[in-house]
Amino acid sequence: MPRWIRSSLVALLATLGALTGCAQQVPDVEPSWIDGWSPTRVAGIEVTAGPSGPRPDGPASRLVAENSDGGPLDRLALNALDDLQIYWKDRLPLDFGRPFDPVDRIVSYDSTRPTGQVCGIDTAGAANAFYCTGEQDTVAWDRGELLPILDRLFGPLAVVTVLAHEVGHAVQFRLSDAPAASTIVREQQADCYTGAFFRWVAEGDSPRFQVSTGPGLNQVLSTLFFIRDNLGTSFDDVGAHGTAFDRVTAFQLGFSDGPRRCAEIDETEIRERITQQGADQADDVDAGGADLRVDDKQNLTALAATLREAFGPASGGRFRLDSAACPGGLTTTPVTYCPASVSVHIDLDGLAEIGASMDEGGLGDFAAFAAVASRYALAVQHAAGLPLDGLVAAQRTACLTGAWAASIRAEQGRRLRLSPGDLDEAVAEMLAVDSLVAADVLGRSVPSGFARVTAFRDGYTAGIDACLANYR
């Protein structure tokens, strides 16, 4: 499958809605977050749908940013930075026996105007946030373009997410006199530290912010999706941060396992875990860069072959290219699994809408194929005598879909195979309100995008047997 092309801001907003690659071999180990798994919990915390964002009664920060306009976005950023420093003042001594001194300098600038330099960086046109190491020890952000875009698309927690990442770099500087070996290690660690901070917020300890583990964390993960690397970026490149799948993975490691786990991320782990291509890997992209036609019968035949190869010939699940309802009116759009006939019904027109590129309002070819795979995964569960309805079945479905995705890595030699950006399309699908990848036979999705992505990754890393054994 070809690579995904970055969409415009408008298309991305439409894709993610109000919810607000060629993969590499990964270690065959059981993910840490499997322990104590529950369909109503996220890394041990109950899934909630309450308010997310600034606390109405939160105290105003007394921090001051150079060059600030005193506006609401700068005040939001300062409140975020204040809470971040409160968190790290406690955690750094607790986890590492090191003090966390407040950052020396805080700078706000407007990238739409010629406002000079920060840390030697010309801020005109620099729609960014960054941390300057060494004696500069500075956190800076663009209030002219970056913060307004983040706030408009994903809400105030998007601003907090970006600043938490930058403070993560300040943590790295305080932990070591020497930077990490590569950019991607530093960036993955910073995303992980961001997850650790949001765990603190989710547990209700932040004076100024709150986040629900359902829609609230979805906003945070959508932010990481938005600021992922462009396709074609190698993880070896200076400035590489990771794909959306990789960035969400790092965030979830921090949220689940805490700051010490973040500090363990190193070059060896990156080489084993990262799904982004390295400079020495062939770019598996078709000449035109367009998505495959998901309503093409030959492509669907190839998809069916990969599903039978992944789950075995006895897994069942005949494909029917129609939208006929099952007995009792069971229908999930645009793909339905019908237990009565042991068949997967595909509405080609509806599938084509999902499979369109994000520029065209869809989610991409892999998102559409994954939706079909999820309904086939119900046939696998049916054959195993497992329940097909309820949150456990929905989560198990996401896990099995991830296991299928791992089976079509390029080195497996399948006709359909993962290309750069495909796993990011899966993340986008699982952050959508009506995700089928993490839905039961009735189309009821797991309420937390965080939990959906976790289950998918469990299958991708640990395989089919782990899905069937752990999600019960």
Image (cartoon, rainbow, N blue to C red):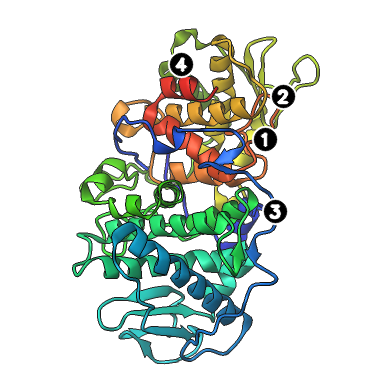
Task: Between residue 362 and residue 441, name the one nearer to us.
Answer: 441
Task: Between residue 161 and residue 32, name the one nearer to us.
Answer: 32
**Residue type beneath disc 4:** Arg
Q: Which residue is tagged 1?
A: 350
Q: Residue furthest right?
A: 328
| Mark nearer the viewer, 3 or 1 | 3
Q: Which mark is residue 323?
A: 2
Q: Badges 3 and 4: C-beta atoms under 8 Å apart?
A: no
Residue 265 x/y as whole percent? 29, 51
Q: Badges 2 and 4: C-beta atoms under 8 Å apart?
A: no
Mark 4 Cα within 10 Å, few/some/many (few <14, many 20+)? some
Q: Quadrant of the C terminus?
A: top right
Q: Badges 3 and 2: C-beta atoms under 8 Å apart?
A: no
Circle 2 — which element? Answer: loop
At 56% from the left and 36% from the top, the residue drawn is: 368
**222 to 463, vertically: above or below:** below
Mark 1 Cα within 10 Å, few/some/many (few <14, many 20+)? some
Circle 3 — which element? Answer: loop
Mark 2 Cα within 10 Å, few/some/many (few <14, many 20+)? some
Mark closest to the chain's N terminus, 2 or 1: 2
Q: CA distance from mark 3 to mark 4?
A: 41 Å
Q: Is residue 158 visible in the rendered structure shown here? A: yes
Q: Is residue 405 visible in the rendered structure shown here? A: no
Q: Which residue is tagged 4?
A: 308
- The quadrant where residue 296 appears: top right
**469 to 405, vertically: above or below:** above
Residue 458 is left or right of residue 216, and the answer is left
Mark closest to the chain's N terminus, 2 or 4: 4
Task: Between residue 396 and residue 275, name the one nearer to us.
Answer: 396
Q: Which residue is tagged 3?
A: 50
Q: CA distance from mark 3 to mark 2?
A: 36 Å
